[in-house]
Amino acid sequence: MTEITHHSQVWTYRTPKKRLLIWAGWLALVALFVWCWQVMTKDTIWIFVQDAPRQAADIGSRMMPPRWSYLPELMVPLWDTLNIATLGTIGGVILAVPVAFMAARNTSPSVTFLRPIALFIIVASRSINSLIWALLLVAIIGPGILAGIIAIALRSIGFVGKLLYEAIEETDRAQIEAIEATGASRAQVLSYGIVPQVMPAFWGISVFRWDINIRESAILGLVGAGGLGLKLQASLNVLAWPQVTMILLLILATVVLSEWVSARVRHAII
């Protein structure tokens, strides 16, 4: 008489080898986190960290109530901030359009030469923060809103250029081929086949960038590029905390309003 034994296999989501690799990965991640934490905090004075809540509460009590009488003095800096954002956005968009068309594969005059240059311009613009651009420009051309406008424009080239050239590359090829079949020139194909398709994206990107630039231009005055940031820096230097609160509230209100305007315009366009 033969005894028959059935060996049933138990299904598991991962094999033992995969589970071991996952645990090893988590262990390596924890070790990396611990090492990074030690590197970042090696010069930290922990007594100051422990005292931070008390200091924050003290400064917060000094910031209230806001100095509402200071609001009229902020109107001109607010106007400068809006001008920096608006003119900087316009300048950045004007410079970004040819860069975007050179970067897009389907419109670049030279994929091997001009396209890498255009991509480098986009990456270089996006890699440097507007505050750093402003710091460099203040050192070159002096303090004032001109440095802020140029800083915003240089920063905007990469943002607008990248999104616009991606929109150009995603255009419907069938429409372009239909225009080419009529014997249209390259300029006519560009004007009637590509530009109409990317115009909604172009306006949406431009308005979105203007909304971002409102926020960035509000702090450029910290390095001397004019606007509300200049008043903020002056108030911080003399520890006028109620004035700081007033400036922060005005910046918040401006950003909220610009966000609402940007959303409405983009909704109307797109």
Image (spheres, helix red, strand yellow):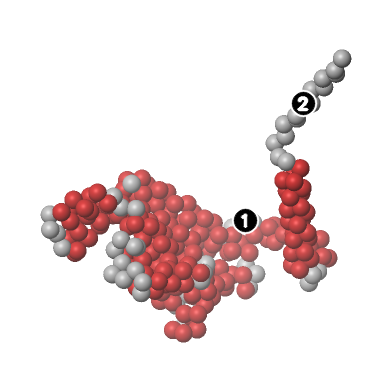
Q: Nearer the viewer, residue 28 or 37?
A: 28
**Residue 35 at x, y percent in the picture:** 77, 64
Q: Residue at x 74, y 64 (%)?
A: 36
Residue found at the very far top of the displayed protein: 1
Residue 82: name its quadrant: bottom left
View extreme (right): residue: 1
Query: Is 33 above or below relative to 268?
Result: below
Q: Amino acid at mark 2?
A: Ser
Quarter of the rendering occupied by the N terminus: top right
Which residue does the image show at 57% across and 73% down from the upper left?
234
Number of other residues with Cα within 10 Å of mark 2, as a class: few under 14, some 14 to 19, many 20 or more = few
**At which x and y percent is residue 12?**
72, 34
Q: Is residue 145 above or below residue 67?
A: below
Q: Viewer-nearest of labels 1 and 2?
A: 2
Q: Pointer 1 and pointer 2: residues touching (CB < 8 Å)?
A: no
Which secondary structure, mark 2? loop
Which is more toward the observer, 95 or 56?
Answer: 95
Amino acid type, label 1: Pro
The answer to whether one can see residue 158 in this image is yes
Q: Position of residue 179 (x, y in %)?
A: 17, 54
Give residue 65's mark: 1
Which residue occupies the foreground of this view, 157 or 44? 157
Residue 67 occupies quadrant: bottom right
Q: Is residue 203 visible?
A: no
Instruction: Report the side of 142 relative to 40 (left or right).
Output: left
Q: Crowding at label 1, few (<14), some or many (≥20) Cα neighbours within 10 Å?
A: few
| In the rendered image, the vertical position of residue 133 relative to residue 2, given as above or below | below
Residue 119 location in percent, x, y? 41, 69
Which sits earlier in the primary sequence, circle 1 or circle 2? 2
Q: Which residue is mark 2?
A: 8
Residue shown at the point (76%, 68%) measured from the top left: 39
How far apart are the alpha carbons under marks 1 and 2? 74 Å
